[in-house]
Amino acid sequence: MSDKFDNVSVVKKANVFFDGKCVSHSVFFPDGTRKTVGVILPGSQLTFNVSTPELMEITSGTCQVKIAGESVAKEYTAGMQFKVAANSSFEIHAKDEVNYVCSFG
């Protein structure tokens, strides 16, 4: 996993969720695809509802994630990723500051 994106456009206005516990920026690639790059603050326990498939790459930090339909939460750390199906949800608990990249579709 590379630590940077080249030749992209970044939306200056942040996406702020859950009273600031999760903040991200949208990044657009030359082919038109979009990713978000964000951070979830330590101690936050959040539930995200997704309409399109998502791939979440954890770039730093440690979190527990429970995807809808799964019986138990799993721990994810830097360099790991998880997928969430369209029209589903996941719960994430940030043990410390969690940085992530989310890909859609």
Image (tube, rainbow, N blue to C red):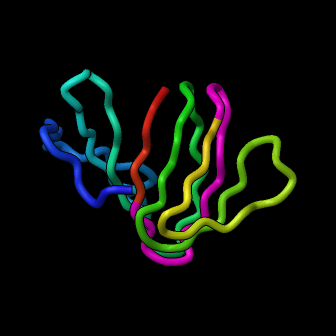
User: Which residue is located at x 49 percent, y 64 percent?
Assistant: 79
Q: Position of residue 11 (x, y in %)?
A: 17, 38
Residue found farthest to the front? 1
Task: Name the image quarter holding the N terminus.
Answer: bottom left
As rendered, which of 42 and 3 lies closer to the eye? Answer: 3
Residue found farthest to the right? 71
Question: On the image, which quarter does residue 103 sit in?
Answer: top left
Question: On the image, which quarter does residue 29 sit in?
Answer: top left
Number of marks in picture: 0
Q: Which residues are magenta?
A: 85-99
Question: On the image, which quarter does residue 36 sit in?
Answer: top left
Instruction: Give the side of residue 1 with respect to residue 82, left or right.
Output: left
User: Which residue is located at x 72 percent, y 54 percent?
Assistant: 66
User: Which residue is located at x 65 percent, y 39 percent?
Assistant: 89
Q: Is residue 42 shown above or below 14?
A: below
Magenta-span inclusion, residue 97: yes
Dominant secondary structure of the residues highlighted in magenta in the image: strand
Q: Is residue 89 shown above or below 105?
A: below
Q: Position of residue 70 (x, y in %)?
A: 82, 48
As rendered, which of 5 and 63 lies closer to the eye? Answer: 5
Instruction: Give the side of residue 13 with respect to residue 59, left or right.
Output: left
User: Which residue is located at x 16 percent, y 38 percent?
Assistant: 8
Q: Position of residue 17 (x, y in %)?
A: 41, 49
